[in-house]
Image (cartoon, rainbow, N blue to C red):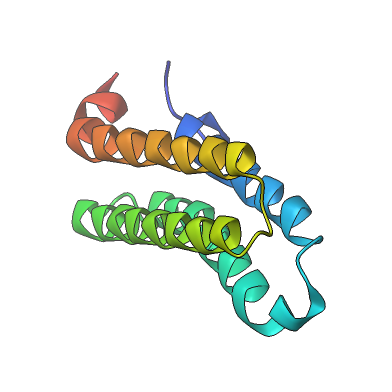
């Protein structure tokens, strides 16, 4: 399948969806976490999708595109760290945090494959 818009990238759609899931879950975090954990997990989860989107916009320059995908990987790992804190602080159930944690592992694998196969994907 040809990639014509950012929405054709499955990894972008998944990252965006996960950021929205985290937003919905974090609404229930305690008020004292608004300026720390809640803000941080929302920012990092959104950063995954936004870095993919920004990199795609600059895909003409492979090194710039890959830098943004690498930044997306970093934000994904940051989000996984915040998920661990949220679980250990008792703000998320173990099952829901594990599910999200695993979904970000899937995002990471997709980002690695995209970086490895980008030339092939665009030539089709």
**Closer-to-camera residue (11/107):** 107
Say which quarter of the image contains residue 86.
bottom right
Picture residue at 63% right of the left edge, 40% below the top: 96
- Residue 66 vs residue 97, the one in the foreground: 97
Q: Is residue 44 left or right of residue 119?
A: right
Q: Can residue 6 be spotted in the picture?
A: no
Q: Nearer the viewer, residue 94 or 63?
A: 94
- Is residue 123 visible from the viewing direction of this image? yes
**Percent of width and height locating residue 74:** 34, 60
Q: Is residue 8 above or below residue 108?
A: above
Q: Quadrant of residue 18?
A: top right
Q: Is residue 66 left or right of residue 30?
A: left
Q: Provide residue 111's location: percent of width, then percent of height.
A: 33, 40
The image position of residue 105, as x and y in percent, is 38, 39
Residue drawn where x is 67% and y is 70% of the image: 38
Q: Is residue 83 left or right of residue 110?
A: right
Residue 93 % position (x, y): 66, 45
Tell me which residue sits at (26%, 32%) in the image.
Answer: 113
Identify the residue at horizontal 26%, vertical 60% (top origin). Answer: 67
Relative to 107, say whether 122 is above or below: above
What is the quadrant of the N terminus in the image? top left
């Amino acid at each position: 399948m040809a990639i014509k818009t950012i929405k054709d990238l499955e990894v972008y759609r998944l990252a965006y969806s996960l950021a929205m899931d985290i937003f919905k879950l974090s609404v229930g975090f305690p008020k004292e976490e608004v300026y720390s954990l809640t803000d941080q997990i929302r920012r990092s989860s959104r950063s995954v999708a936004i870095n993919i989107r920004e990199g795609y916009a600059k895909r003409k320059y492979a090194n710039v595109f890959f830098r943004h995908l690498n930044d997306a990987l970093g934000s994904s790992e940051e989000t996984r760290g915040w998920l661990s804190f949220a679980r250990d602080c008792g703000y998320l159930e173990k099952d829901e945090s594990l599910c999200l944690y695993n979904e970000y592992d899937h995002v990471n694998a997709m980002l690695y494959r995209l970086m490895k196969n980008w030339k092939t994907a665009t030539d089709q």
